[in-house]
Amino acid sequence: MFYLKSLKLNNFRCYKEYYQEFTPKINIIIGDNAVGKTSIIEGIYVLGVTKSHKAAIDNEMIKHNEEFSLIKGEFKGDKTDVVTLSLTEKGKQIIKNEKKIKHLSEYLGFYYSVLFCPEDVEIIKGAPAIKRRFLDINIGQLNQTYLNNLIDYRKILKDRNKMLKEFQERDDFNKELLDIYTKQLISKAKDIILTRQEFIKKLNVYFKKQVSLISDGKEDAYIKYMPNTTIENIEKDYKEKEKVDFITKTTNVGPHRDDFIVYFNEHESIYASQGQQKTFALALKLALIDILKEKSNKIIVILDDVFGELDIIRQKEIIKLLEIDYQIFITTTSIDHLNSDVLRNSNIIRINKEGEYNGRSL
């Protein structure tokens, strides 16, 4: 069984130093709000996907007034692996088994992180940028080619937007170079759109099943991909929007403006109740686990303060996760909602106050 044996944090969020060992199955981190529970599981999540679910930029994870942050994990499976991720103002670096990782695509897929948190409902009702982030992080875990295409696309997009901003400021504007950027963007965009289509199609199979299970057959839901443009029309759309691009000084066509909508009983999810939206968010993450299981058994599941947000029916679906053969981390302010069998087989870690814990230090 694959699992995280130990975690070390330095200058990470509220922690100057943190060290804790974990059991292969269920680890429950208990403490009051704002004492550092989420920072611990954020570190675990970041080790998996190299991005935070909380921070808009990586530097936010560095402890105030410090110059660097470090996350180190020791993993057990067929062999022992040690991964260190360091953050500075210049960027991040990953070292696995004393070897520097040059490209993220070489590392992603080492293990898969699936995080459940109260903010998941924003994937259902939130802005398109939140939904694209969900797609990019989770497809990126599974598909190295997609990740590379996305990195290239963002770099070309940045260069093209820079040229558009300079259009009215320079007499020697190079239209030929802009056209080169456009052609490069179109090439990468087609691959990104196709991969997103395929991922959502596959996700839908499991998503519909999970929604039906959680709602006891009362809800029928599916995800509809809403691309900003299509593979067939992208060249025409870029040409038609070029004048608008010059006026707005930004690129108005491409997958950086994609969206998806969850429909239930043929209605958009914005018309769903809060409870229904939570059902769809929960089903989405459960469906993600179903997809990852096809790829690997190296999965770590994180439940960040979700029990208080869910009613009894949805809590039961979450508790079913505790029966799977993966390592699970739970953060909570109370263990009253967990049955005695779960508690008996769990490693309970109590966080006392911000930056302090009952683990041992190196």
Image (cartoon, rainbow, N blue to C red):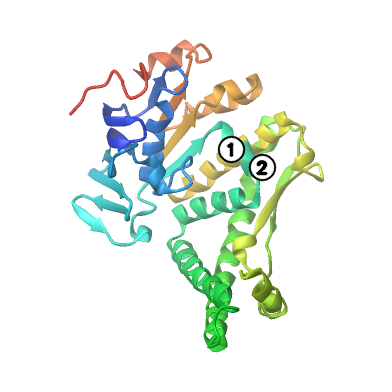
Q: Residues within 10 Å of mark 1 (few under 14, many from 20)?
A: many
Q: CA gap, disc 1 to disc 2?
A: 8 Å
Check whether the beta carbons of the residues at disc 1 and disc 2 lie within 8 A of each other: yes
In the rendering, which numbered label is found on residue 265?
none
Q: Residues within 10 Å of mark 2 (few under 14, many from 20)?
A: many
Q: Position of residue 55 (x, y in %)?
A: 46, 43
Q: Residue at x 79, y 39 (%)?
A: 271
* Circle 2: residue type: Ile
Q: Quadrant of the C terminus?
A: top left
Q: Position of residue 250 (x, y in %)?
A: 61, 69
Residue 279, can we see it? yes
Instruction: Please give the residue where the numbered disc 1 appears in the rendered image.
Output: 120
Q: Nearer the viewer, residue 206 or 180?
A: 180
Q: Is residue 200 above or below residue 247?
A: above
* Circle 1: residue type: Asp
Image-based side of 101 in relation to 221, left or right: left
Q: Nearer the viewer, residue 130 or 164?
A: 164
